[in-house]
Amino acid sequence: MTDTSATQAKRPASGFKIDFHVWGPIIALIVLVIAGALMNPNFLSYGNVTNVLARSAFIGIIAVGMTFVITSGGLDLSVGSMAAFIAGVMILIMNALLPSMGVGIGIVLVGMASALVVGLAAGLVNGLLITQARIEAFIVTLGTMGIFRSLITWLADGGTLSLDYSVREIYRPVYYSGLFGVAWPIIVFAVIAIIGEMIMRHTAFGRHCAAIGSNEQVARYSAVHVDRVRLATYVFLGILVGIATIMYVPRLGSASSATGVLWELEAIAAVIIGGTVLKGGFGRVWGTVVGVLILSLIDNLLNLTDLVSPYLNGAIQGVIIILAVVLQRQKKAAR
C-alpha cells in the first residue's frame, strides 16, 4: 500500500456530523418540549408557556450578565442575595416617599432608579474587591452573598417587607401587563438577550472578555485593560440584577430573606448548559437563553407531573451543572 493510500485509509469517512457543543442545548430543548407535550396536554398551552417565560425572565436577565462574568474567567455567587437586598431597598424607598410624593407613576420610577443605582453599586463593590484588592471572585462573592442576605434580613427585622397596597396597584402592570399579549418581563429579557449577544459577538468588549478568560497574561500583553474589562462585567451584571428585580417586585410586592434563594445556582447552570466554558475563554448569550428555557421547562414539568418532587429542583440543577462541566472537559480532552 502506498503512502497516499495509507493516508486515505486513516482518514475518517466523510459524512454529516452534528457538533453537539453547538447544537446540543437546542436539541435538548426540542426533546424537552416534545416530551412535555406528550406527558401533559396543557404543557404547550398559551397560558402555561407565557407563565413559564415570564417567571424565567428574572433568571434570564441575570444569566445574560453572568455570561460575561464567566466568559472573562470570573464568577458571582451573590446575585440572588443582591436581588433580595435591592428589592428590600426599593420597597423601603417607595414606602417612605409615599406621604410626600403620593400615589403615581413618579414614585414607581424613583423605585426603579434606586434599583439600578443599588445594583450598579453592588456590582461595583464586587468588581473593585476582585480587581483592586486582588481577592478571588469566589471568596468575594461568597462574602457579599452573606452580607446582602443578612442586610435584607435586618431591614425586614427577620420578616417580610411589603410594598404599600396603593403603590403595588400602580406597579403591578410592570409584571402582569405587556405588549400584544406578551408580558413586559419577556420583552425586556428578549431585548437584553439580543443586546448581550451583539455585544459578545460584535464588540471589542466581548472579544476582550473572551481573551481575558482564555489567558489573562496574553490579554495584558495584547494591550487589553484587564482590570477595567473585568470590573465592567461585574458592574454590568449588577445593573442587570437591578433590572431583574424591577421586573420581580410587582409580582409579589414584597421582599424577605427568602427572596432570590438559589438564583445564583440557576443563573450559573443556565450559562454552563448554554455552552459557555466555566473556566472562561468562550461564551455565547444565545446558548444561555436556551439554558434558561431548559431549566424553566424542567421546573414546569416537575410541577405538572408527578415524576419527581418539585422540591428536588435544586438537586436536579446541581446535577445538570456537574454533567455540563464533565461534558466540557471530555470535549476539551478529545481535541
Image (spheres, rainbow, N blue to C red):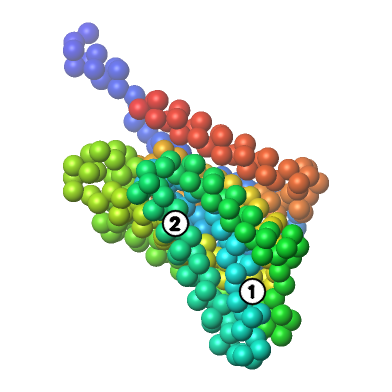
| Residue 330 at x, y percent in the picture | 45, 28
Residue at 74% in and 59% down: 158
- Viewer-side residue, 256 vs 55: 256
Q: Identify the residue at image location x=68%, y=40%.
A: 315
Say which label, 2 or 1, has the lower sequence index: 1
Residue 334 in the image, given as x and y percentages of width and height: 39, 25
The part of the image, by quadrant, that contains residue 73 is: top left
Q: Which mark is residue 92?
A: 1
Q: Residue at x 34, y 24 (%)?
A: 12
- Compared to residue 249, the image places residue 134 above or below, namely above
Residue 24 drawn above or below residue 38? above
User: Closer to the camera, 305 or 144?
Assistant: 144
Does residue 101 lie above or below 42 as drawn? Answer: below
Check disc 1 and give the amino acid type. Answer: Leu
Q: Which amino acid type is marked by label 2?
A: Val
What residue sits right under mark 2 in the picture?
A: 125
Indicate the quadrant containing the C terminus: top left, top right, bottom left or bottom right.
top left
